[in-house]
Image: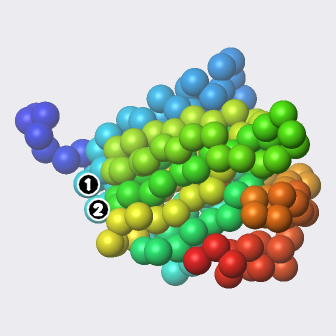
Amino acid sequence: MSEQQTSSFDLDALIVQLKHASRGEEPAKKIRHLIETAVANAQGVIDGIPHFEEDEVLLFEDDAVSIWHCRFLPGAAVPPHDHRMSAVIGVYTGQERNDFFENDPNGLIRKSGEAFLASGDVLSIGPSAIHSVACVSEAPCCGIHVYLGALTEIDRSLFDVQANETLKFTDENYQRLHAADV
Ligand SMILES: [Fe+2]
């Protein structure tokens, strides 16, 4: 078989592999390897992944792992937030900019770095990370996001950087910051 031939992508099989990896040793490393392998075959993912109506779709969640498909539309931005658990993000189409934030010695929330992810790129972030995400491509940016825990079951935070405020991660606060950011 030619190496240039695009292999097929099976989302259900990947979910089974991610669930298995989340229960073994070094889950973050193994999940990263699975996501790297998946998005390295970006055209295969584009061809093989189902079409999702919603921009953010929870594919699976239990105590050990949460798996999401996320689509960011051009110009859209997700306000700064935390996850309180490690995460692995793999992009298979489009490009996104991640801005990272941290508390400086004066207690201010300041930008501390950034990372651009394009098709085939994978980002691993730790449990204390704070980031915002913006789609910077002319087409939607799509990726598979894996969190090492039950993301919907925990209290998380949003960050209003301009007001230097930490807020509860609620729909209301999300919409307010989202509207202010764009
Ligand atoms: Fe995030």
What's the CA distance linking mark 2 and mark 1?
6 Å
Total numbered labels placed on residues in the image: 2
In front of the other: 107 or 10: 107
Horizontal relation, residue 118 to residue 157: left or right:
left
The C terminus sits in image quarter: bottom right
| Above-or-below relation of 100 to 68 | above
Residue 163: image location, x then y, percent: 82, 65
Residue at 29 percent across and 62 percent down: it is 47
Residue 94: image location, x then y, percent: 35, 61
Q: Amino acid at mark 1?
A: Gln
Residue linked to disc 2: 47
Residue 155: image location, x then y, percent: 91, 55
The N terminus sits in image quarter: top left
Say whether residue 141 is visible.
no
| Above-or-below relation of 79 to 14 | below
Residue 120: image location, x then y, percent: 35, 44
CB atoms of marks 2 and 1 within 8 Å: yes
Of badges 2 and 1, nearer the viewer stands 1
Q: Residues within 10 Å of mark 2 (few under 14, many from 20)?
A: few
Mark 2 lies on a secondary structure that is: helix
Horizontal relation, residue 78 to residue 117: left or right:
right
Residue 43 has which mark? 1
Say whether residue 180 is visible.
yes
Tell me, what colour scheme is on the image? rainbow
Q: Amino acid at mark 2?
A: Asp
Residue 30 has which mark? none
Q: Quadrant of residue 138?
A: bottom left
Residue at 86 percent across and 40 percent down: it is 106
Residue at 58 percent across and 50 percent down: it is 99
In front of the other: 14 or 123: 123
Residue at 36 percent across and 50 percent down: it is 118
